Image (spheres, coloured by chain):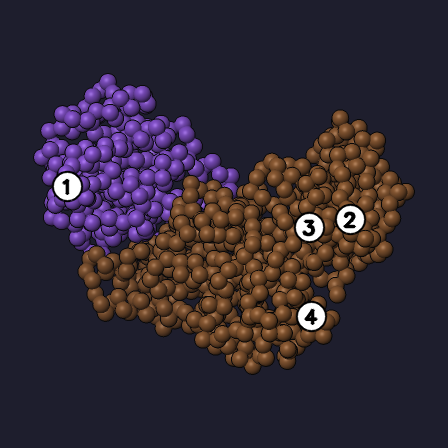
Amino acid sequence: MRQSFAIGIGGAAGQGVATPGDIFAKIFSRRGLHLNVYNAYQSIIRGGHTFLTIRTGPDKITNMGDRIDLLIPLNQDTMDRHLVLLSSGGACIYNADTIKPGKPADGVQLCPLPVSKLADISRNKIAQNTLAIGAALSMTGVGFQALESVLIEQFRKKEKAVIDENVGLARVGYDYATQNFKAFANPLPMTDTRYAVLGGNAAMAMGGAAAGVKFYCAYPMSPSTGVLHWMADHARKANIMVRQVEDEIGVINMAIGAAHAGVRAMCATSGGGFALMSEALGLSAQAEIPVVVIDCQRAGPSTGVPTKTEQGDLWQMLGASFGDYPRVIAAPLDIGDCFTLIPEIFNIAERYQCPGIVLCDLLLAEGRLSVDPAILDFNPKVDRGEMITSANGNGNGSYKRYLITESGVSPRAVPGIPGHTHVVSSDEHDEDGVLISDEYTNTVKRRAMMEKRMRKVQGIEASVEPPKMQGPADAEVTLVGWGSTQGVIEEARDLLADQGIIANQLQIRWLVPLHGDAIAGILKKCRHTIIIENNYSGQFARYLRSETSFVADGHIRKYDGEPFMPHHIVEAVKEQLKGSTTLSVPTHEIMV
Amino acid sequence: MATDIATPKLTTMADLKGKVDPDWCPGCGDFGVLAAVQKALVELQIPNHEVATISGIGCSSNFPGYINTYGMHTLHGRSLAVATGFKMANHGMTVLVTGGDGDGFGIGGNHFMHTMRRNVDLLYIVMDNQIYGLTTGQTSPTSRKGMKTKSMPFGNVEGPINPISLALSAGATFIARGFSAEQKHLTELIKQGIQHKGFSFIDVFSPCVTYNHDNTFQWFRPRVKKLEDNPEYDSTNWMAAMEKSLLWGDEIPIGKFFERTDVPTLHESEPVLATEPLVKQSSRIPADVARAFVEELM
């Protein structure tokens, strides 16, 4: 069992749930602790209910975990909903003036703060939050100095009086807890490591900047909007042209225009916006203009549940746009990978002049994770493929944009070079870009051009390694996941091992190219295979079957809008190994 | 990239001739527009490799194939979005966008409106024939009320849009109307449109000789009156332009309706593009900037 400590903070939207989360995250990461932040919220700006879980510890933390140790309800609703999550050893810090506790489980410590006695609440509306933060850090054995410096940073744009007041309040809460509440049995440890606290959307934006993206555009859509926010905020420092566009159709077409002019172009959206982009994805493929599109999946169909996670867009990505064409699809495995994947997929998309799709989801996009800052490499390998950037004596007009080659890749002349004028086209075309659909139809040329483009698939396949088995080679059960479930499946395997069940894991990062033969080769040797995914129909299981004929022994699926917790997987694996079912759909216990 | 040409040579009509001849119907108005664009580029002496001609889909959108410049034949209605991205990535190039009324005012209407308000520095030429030609004759957004087409065999019950007044209200900074049969006049408008800094829009009457039997060359000829022939007309007066734009019937004004030169273009408004075109800039993040980005997370 991994050593960890989880705090749950809940309240209405607008009550200031985010700020304590940011403060705890900074303090824990500076203590050298791993952390993961997950915010369960509703599509509402003021009111409703939002519940933020921040889990920390010296061991690798990849997900929200199974347990809340400290509950900080900012309103009665949160107390009523979530007190039940605490078990023996847990504690609940709350404003005794406004919130009535329910009946906690045995061994749970109730920690009422007499807020109106400790602070002037007529002056400071969020006094209860600051007092609670102070109290929480006292009980977890964190020195006050750490809190003071983070508070000073947090309020640096405010006047000194505001800073002093908040530091003072935190001190009062800290001291009150020291005198009146029982500290947690295990104080939070410290290590010498220092982590960056990274959000998935920021990671993908930074990954884009590192990859050399010069043009980014988007239309706001949850949960992808954070990419736009990072880009817009940092555009002038990074020299990136960032545009907010009228709709997602405009977004991808604008990106394609910029890409054709010779720069790396990227855009991000969610499933609905991606649907609008579909036609132009085919333009990218047909005109052979590489772009990278990020899809942050949320629960669908249609407007669906805009603030909840799902892995439900796989088939949309596989089938996006009409006709056959080469494409690349990859799903980042964690928030750090949201950064790392972007330069990798750009290199393939540009080398093979085709669209690249990053299949992220809300869980990663809006989550936060402690990562080693060393992985944020702003000088990654950049391969722009075969590009012609100067006439170099060859400007005699014989250039053919869609030259038929063995690899299927035709060198791409950047517009502006003398002697290389050409037309790129969404209509089928000849080697030199002359339309063959309108000017004249020609079966031989159409076939040759189709085969030229599709030959690129072989190169794309060769540029990505097949996935590798994680954990012991021989295991009682093999868990198969894709994308964002990497961390939670990994932790579930640890928990199963504690209970004597040896599990290994095959996690899929590259969906296209899939390397289906290699995957089937691995899975056919496994004793019992279970595919785990955050959707209703088993989109990956169906895809794997269509590509390889491989059928797994069982499935664990979740489509209630919330991510898997480790125990969901542990319990499902156990029931399936007993033979009671082949399809488990865990119930989510935290209701937001 | 334009600099590695060793000996600057004159741009001629031959340089601008496309790889294939247009497959438009004999007598199509679009021939006149193509010739006028080529003449304008020769008269302005813009080398063909410094020009990008970007279109959507339709008869007139085949235009980039018939002129020897850098060309993009994109998706139906999306030419302005593609062109905006292209211009932002390389604002050193002259960008021409060509297409029809269905492409620009129907399926592409949203991009039309937003490209105008952004004042993207490009020339948008709509070959307006008031009909869908490549799909063999259906009602378009500029088809007159009552016009009979294959999609409205009992007559169009919808009213047309007015591209000129629409452009005026959306904030376009150069707005003109041409007629394909008035070559010299059209060439002059295109030259002005290219030279204008900002979004230039020229709605060109370009009759469809196959499917539109209402708005023919013969119909337009006696009706079109050049604004330039009226010495009183002030094309810097937005209200006067709006009034003229509403004229339709026995007298239909052509010429420059409106121009203002005091609005910065989109690329001029962006500090990121202040030094040189994006495509010529380094794509590496300087080490100190990268360090600062990571430091924000610590």
Q: CA distance from mark 4 to mark 2?
A: 29 Å
Q: Are marks 1 and 2 in contact (CB under 8 Å)?
A: no
Residue at which label 1 appears:
B153
State the image coordinates of residue A528 (x, y, percent, origin top left): 58, 76
Q: CA distance from mark 1 to mark 4?
A: 71 Å
Residue at which label 3 appears:
A53
Q: Which mark is residue A104?
A: 2
**Dot 4: within a 10 Å radius of its alpha carbon, few (fewer than 14), some, or many (20 or more) residues?**
many
Q: Which lettered chain is shown in purple?
A: B
**Secondary-structure class at tag 1:** loop
> Residue most toward the right?
A179
Q: Is residue A411 left or right of residue A47?
A: left
Residue nearer the viewer, B15 or A130:
A130
Dividing the picture into quadrants, the one containing residue A378 is: bottom right
Task: Give the amino acid at mark 3.
Answer: Thr
Q: Earlier in the sequence, mark 4 or mark 2?
A: 2
Task: Give the amino acid at mark 1.
Answer: Pro
Task: Give the amino acid at mark 2.
Answer: Pro
Q: Are marks 4 and 3 on the same chain?
A: yes
For the residues carrying marks 4 and 3, which lies nearer the camera in this image? 4
Residue B58 appears in the picture as rendered? yes
Q: Are marks 1 and 3 in contact (CB under 8 Å)?
A: no
Residue at which label 4 appears:
A496
Q: Earlier in the sequence, mark 4 or mark 3?
A: 3
Q: Is residue A144 left or right of residue A229?
A: right
State the image coordinates of residue A386 (x, y, percent, origin top left): 42, 64
